Image (cartoon, grey):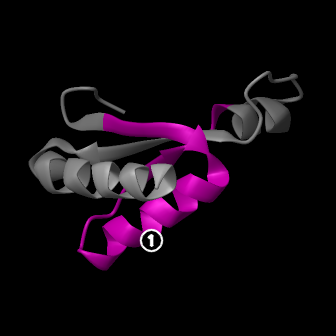
Amino acid sequence: MSTSEYTKVYYGNFIIVTRLKNALEHIGIVPIIKDEGESQRLAGYGSMNQGYQEVFVHNDELDKASAIVEQIKAEMEA
């Protein structure tokens, strides 16, 4: 994944990532979900970050995606 085309907008547990993914898809953004822990598990290695995932969006959609991320973070703190 080229860092020039995609930007990480969130890192957290899979429950919040799933909620964020659904919210982004609702407004027409298709995020890329990266799960290093699962990749390591499938390769036969242990992982310290099991259950944590990264959410990436295309740079063209970064402003809209960032607004959704901030909204969901605010809801979690309320």
The residue shown at (65%, 32%) is 36
- Residue flagged by tag 1: what amino acid is it? Asn
Q: Is residue 64 above or below residue 52?
A: below
Q: Which residues are magenta?
A: 8-36
Snapshot quadrant of residue 65: bottom left
Q: Nearer the viewer, residue 10 or 34?
A: 10
Image spot of residue 50 (x, y percent): 77, 35
- Asked if residue 13 is among those painted magenta in the image, a careful observer would answer yes
Left or right, residue 13 beside residue 78: right
Q: Nearer the viewer, residue 12 or 31?
A: 12
Left or right, residue 11 beside residue 44: left
Packing grade of label 1 (10 A; few <14, some 14-19, many >=20) is some
Q: Nearer the viewer, residue 30 or 18?
A: 18
Left or right, residue 59 beside residue 38: left
Q: Which residue is mark 1?
A: 22
Mark 1: secondary structure: helix
The residue shown at (46%, 56%) is 78
Which residue is outermost to the front? 78
Q: How many marks?
A: 1
**Figure quadrant of the N terminus:** top left
- Asked if residue 32 is among those painted magenta in the image, a careful observer would answer yes
The residue shown at (26%, 65%) is 29
The residue shown at (64%, 57%) is 15
Image spot of residue 4 (x, y percent): 19, 27
